[in-house]
Amino acid sequence: SSFNRAQRKRAEQVFTRACQIADDYGLDVELIVKSGDVVEEIRSYADAEAVDRIIIADHQPTGVRPRLRGVPTSIARQAALPVTMVG
């Protein structure tokens, strides 16, 4: 996997919290791990699985993650379905 230990731990924390929130609303959440171009992988998965909405974190730019800001915007521009950005 291309995740380092700290990234994997943070992802697990975020996913655990997402599952708790989804459970509060009676929703199911599924963890999918892919590698490659982020925008293309998300779009491809959404198309293949016929999802009805993409919900993605909208990271605020920081010194460490300035380029992540463009991913949600790119997905919203290129997806053929509704995209909700949360931050």
Image: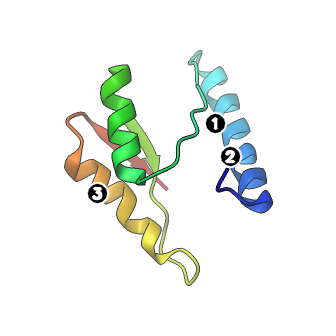
According to the picture, the residue beneath numbered tag 3 turns out to be 74
Give how far across and how far down residue 25 sits, in percent.
58, 21
Query: Residue 50 sits in which quadrant?
Result: top left
Q: Describe the element under mark 1 as helix, strand or loop.
A: helix
User: Residues at badges 2 and 1 in contact (C-beta under 8 Å)?
Assistant: yes
Q: Describe the element under mark 2 as helix, strand or loop.
A: helix
The three-letter amino acid code for the residue at tag 3 is Ser
Q: Residue at x 58, y 79 (%)?
A: 64
Q: Describe the element under mark 3 as helix, strand or loop.
A: helix
Q: Earlier in the sequence, mark 3 or mark 1?
A: 1
For marks 2 and 3, give the CA distance: 22 Å
According to the picture, the residue beneath numbered tag 1 turns out to be 18
Residue 10 appears in the figure: yes
User: With respect to residue 42, does 53 lie above or below?
Assistant: above
Q: Residue at x 60, y 26 (%)?
A: 22
Q: Residue at x 57, y 33 (%)?
A: 32
User: Residues at badges 3 and 1 in contact (C-beta under 8 Å)?
Assistant: no
Q: Earlier in the sequence, mark 2 or mark 3?
A: 2
Query: Residue 4 sits in which quadrant?
Result: bottom right
Give how far across and how far down residue 6 sits, in percent.
78, 61
Q: Is residue 5 left or right of residue 33?
A: right
User: With respect to residue 54, does 75 lie above or below?
Assistant: below
Give how far across and how far down residue 23 sits, in percent.
66, 21
Q: Which mark is residue 14?
A: 2
Q: Residue at x 64, y 36 (%)?
A: 18
